[in-house]
Amino acid sequence: MPSIAVIRFPGSNCDRDIITGVASITGTKPSAIWYKDTDIARHDLIILPGGFSFGDYLRGGAIAARAPIMDEIQDHVWRGGYVLGICNGFQILTESELLPGALMRNVGLKYVCRDVVIKAHHADDGLLSAFKDGQSFRMPVAHNEGNYYADEETLARLQDKGQIAFTYTAGIGGDKHIDANPNGAIEDIAGIVSENGRVLGMMPHPERNLDPIHGGGGQDGRQLLKNLIEAVAP
């Protein structure tokens, strides 16, 4: 099994959820690393969890992107390591320029917390390699700044290089229709990967749909995380 670590920032509130979820899949509890650490052991996958790091002051993820641990994460990326950023973690990845584009306030300027359906886009290698193209997952979003934006040149590059990882799509949840795009993201983008496929940011929360007890109709989050772990396994 791959070695996995979860970074904790002041204001993280999904760190325990993702630690519990990964442990339930791999049988091994991931390392928990505090944001002030400047020397971390090598890991196959580093996860930046959801929450409100540093209270989302300035912008979501803006302060965390300049925390001491981020130099280590930059080095981890340059060495060819994998990184997953969920919700606030995605914001941190764009603020630190490990991923292109920006996450802006939701259309309508309202916090959104509900289920969505996302569609995965397969890649031959990297974090998307274990997904089937068009594979769909239902899971929650919970964010105020999930409106992904990139300029025309960046968007064209993301499309040409297959860097769009997940897109919001219409689906049915129980007897209620689920609207596709919850935040106004350009091209319905719910997640992107770096050009080398090793850094992934996504707005939906797979760690909140790991077990039938969570509701939402099943274990789509578990399957999504299993795919990612399979992709990074040595």
Image: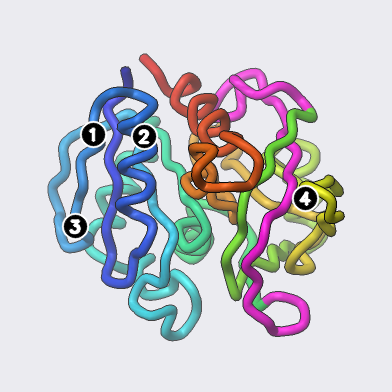
Using the image, tell me which numbered label, if any, was put on residue 34. 3
Q: Residue 71 is drawn in which quadrant?
A: bottom left
Tag 3 and tag 1, C-beta contact below 8 Å: no
Q: Nearer the viewer, mark 3 or mark 2?
A: 2
Percent position of residue 166, x then y: 70, 43
Which residue: 61% across, 28% down? 128
Marks 1 and 4, Cα distance to the nearest angstrom? Answer: 31 Å
Q: Which quadrant holds the C terminus?
A: top left
Q: Residue 29 is drawn in which quadrant?
A: top left
Q: Secondary structure at mark 1?
A: loop
Left or right: where does residue 85 sit relative to residue 54?
Answer: right
Give the magenta-colored segment's residue range.
106-133
Q: Nearer the viewer, mark 2 or mark 4?
A: 2
Q: Which residue is mark 2?
A: 22
Q: Earlier in the sequence, mark 3 or mark 1?
A: 1
Percent position of residue 39, x then y: 13, 47
